[in-house]
Structures are given as C-alpha cells and as structure tokens.
Amino acid sequence: MTSTLLFCIAEEAKPFIPRAMREISPEDSCPPIYYLVESKVCPDRSTGFKSQLRDGEPFGSEFIGASKEECQSWAKSNWNDVNFISKNIIAIADERSARDGTLLLSYYCSTSENAQLEFKGWGPLPPKSDTWYDFRIEPVGSDDLHTDLFFAPIETAYPTYFGHPEKFTNKTGVFDVFKANKYVAGMDSEQEDEL
C-alpha cells in the first residue's frame, strides 16, 4: 500500500495537520492516506514517516516557507526511489489551510506515452503532459479524489477532473470532490448533460 506525501509549508498550518490526517484514517486499523514529510531526506522505509498525529502532538517540517514547486520537485525526485510513496500526487497544507481547513492536492501528469488520452470533445486529457494540476479540497474528500484519479474508469474521471474542473469548483476555489465522485461513479445523470 502506498500513501501520499503531505507537506506542511506554513507554521500556522501545523495545528491543522492532525485533523487533516485524521479525516481519512480516524482509526488505527485504517491504512494511512498520508505520510507527513518532515525532513528533506527521504526515509528508506515507510516507518520513517508519520501517518497519524494527535492534536497538539509536535512535529517538525523542513518545508516551512517552501513553495509548492519545491514540494513538487522534492516528491518527483524521491517517489521512484521507494515503493511506499504514491506517485503523481502530493498534498500541501499552506497558510490557506490554516484559515479555511482545506488542502491543496497537486496531481502530476507525466510525459509517459499513456499519461494523456484522447477524449472526444476535449482532446487530450489531461491537457498537458509534464504538468501539475491543482485541486483545493476539503480533507474528508481526499480518499475519493485518490480513488477517482487512480482507480475509476478514465472515461469519466479524466473529463471530470481535467476536462471541466471548474464545474465542480465553488466560488472560493474549492473543488467539490463528492460532486465529482458522483459523476465519475455515474450517479449524477444531470451532470453528464452539462459536461
């Protein structure tokens, strides 16, 4: 099982991290969706990452003050070296996370031959290769977003997430994963007409 790298890049977002991690794995028996990146040296075992935190539990982050691009670059340079990190996706807790309780999930479309697929009416999706695509989400939607992007039928997942993501994004820029998931699962027939 792999988990997504979670970066904390703002000191004020630190109190938010335990809640973000708990939204997905509320019990010890649940597999973790996130590995908290504390050091710029990638652990060689999954136990080198924290996958749960209690409220108020201290942790370090050598990424405080880092940019989104620095986190993306670090992830790309490390995710092929070990077999327990989810490739092509990272999560970032930033200053906005501290204010509104959202996470920035960043998905990477590689340059590999099958990274982009042609879709009638949209062309290639994701639109560009070697590009990161950002989704500002509520942490409780993380598991559904991962499922949609990595395991759902691409015939519905790619148009939903990369064809018209604005149809699932509210006026504050938060992507509604649950609304998108309903469409991907074929449960929202009205949405199909709109896309």
Image (cartoon, helix red, strand yellow):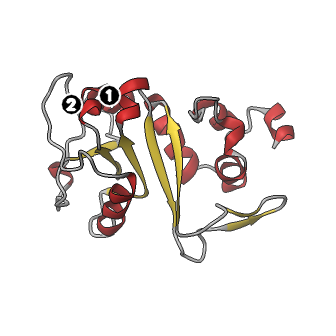
User: Residue at the location (64% across, 35% down)?
Assistant: 169
Give the side of residue 21 with respect to residue 143, left or right.
left
Type of the residue with mark 1: Arg
Q: Is residue 153 above or below residue 100?
A: below
| Contact flag, marks 1 and 2 (Cβ < 8 Å) | yes
Q: Which of the two discs, 1 and 2, labels the residue nearer the N terminus?
A: 1
Q: What residue is at 84 percent from the left and 58 percent from the top? A: 121
Residue 53: mark in rendering: 2
* Quarter of the figure with residue 28: top left
Against 88, residue 65 (above or below) is above
The 10 Å Cα crowd at callout 2, few under 14, some 14 to 19, many 20 or more, is some
Q: Mark 1 and mark 2: span between their CA atoms?
A: 8 Å
Mark 1 packing: few (<14 Cα in 10 Å), some, or many (20+)? many
Which picture quadrant has residue 70?
A: bottom left
What residue is rendered at 29% in x and 43% in y? 9
As rendered, which of 190 and 123 lies closer to the eye? 123
Residue closer to the observer: 90 or 32: 90
